[in-house]
Image: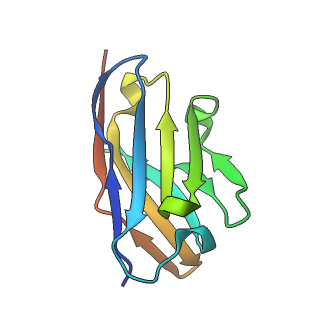
């Protein structure tokens, strides 16, 4: 079992910034060798991909966050970050970190709440 730990959520005004962090509490798991992603789920909506980063550091973003959010790795810290700028009220959601080992093996963090006030 892989335990992912997110942090960095909170309440921010529209136009503000937050940085989310995802690391692992499971010994021996090195995130740089895993495809990682950030997803979010707003009330009454399906979970959606926000950003993903491959083991080759190729990145992929949801259309609604392109140009505003950046996903990155800090291999020395064994952490994946999501830098969120110019936040909008519609970005309000629970944000989940994901570790994708294979098509059949994906682990999730517990989620961190992001609330953007207008």
Query: Does residue 93 sit above or below 54 in this rendering?
Result: above
In the rendered structure, the answer to whether residue 1 lies left or right of residue 33 reads left
Residue 54: name its quadrant.
bottom right
User: Residue visible at 47% across and 79% down?
Assistant: 29
Q: Residue 52: give x, y in percent of width and height.
A: 59, 54
The answer to whether residue 81 is left or right of residue 73 is left
Q: Can residue 32 be seen in this view?
A: yes
34 or 114, nearer to the observer:
34
Query: Based on the displayed image, in which of its 4 quarters is residue 107 positioned?
Result: bottom left
Could you say where residue 51 lies in the image, as x and y percent from the top left? 57, 48
Where's residue 92, x and y in %? Answer: 34, 34
x 30%, y 24%: residue: 12
Q: Can residue 46 be seen in this view?
A: no
Is residue 73 placed above or below 20 in the rendered structure? Answer: below
Q: Nearer the viewer, residue 94 or 84?
A: 84
Which quadrant is the N terminus positioned in?
bottom left
Please tell me whether residue 112 is drawn above or below residue 54 in the rendered image: above
- Check the image and tell me how it is coloured: rainbow
> Where, by quadrant of the figure, is residue 13 drawn?
top left
**Residue at position x 30%, y 41% from top?**
9
Left or right of 42: which side holds 62?
right
Find residue 48 and report its horizontal and vertical position in percent.
48, 50
Query: How many callouts does the rendering have?
Result: 0
Instruction: Name the residue at the front extreme.
Output: 76
In the displayed structure, 95 sits above or below 12; it is: below
Name the quarter where the C terminus is drawn. Answer: top left
At a point 42% along the width and 26% down the height, the residue shown is 17
């Amino acid at each position: 079992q892989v335990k992912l730990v997110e942090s960095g959520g909170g309440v921010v005004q529209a136009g503000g910034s937050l940085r989310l962090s995802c690391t692992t509490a499971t010994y021996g798991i090195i995130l740089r060798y895993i495809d990682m992603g950030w997803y979010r789920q707003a009330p009454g909506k399906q979970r959606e991909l926000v950003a993903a980063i491959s083991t080759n550091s190729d990145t992929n973003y949801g259309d609604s966050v392109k140009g505003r959010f950046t996903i990155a790795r800090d291999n020395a810290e064994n952490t994946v970050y999501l830098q969120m700028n110019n936040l909008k009220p519609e970005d309000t959601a629970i944000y989940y970190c994901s570790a994708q080992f294979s098509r059949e093996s994906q682990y999730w963090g517990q989620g961190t709440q992001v609330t953007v006030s207008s």
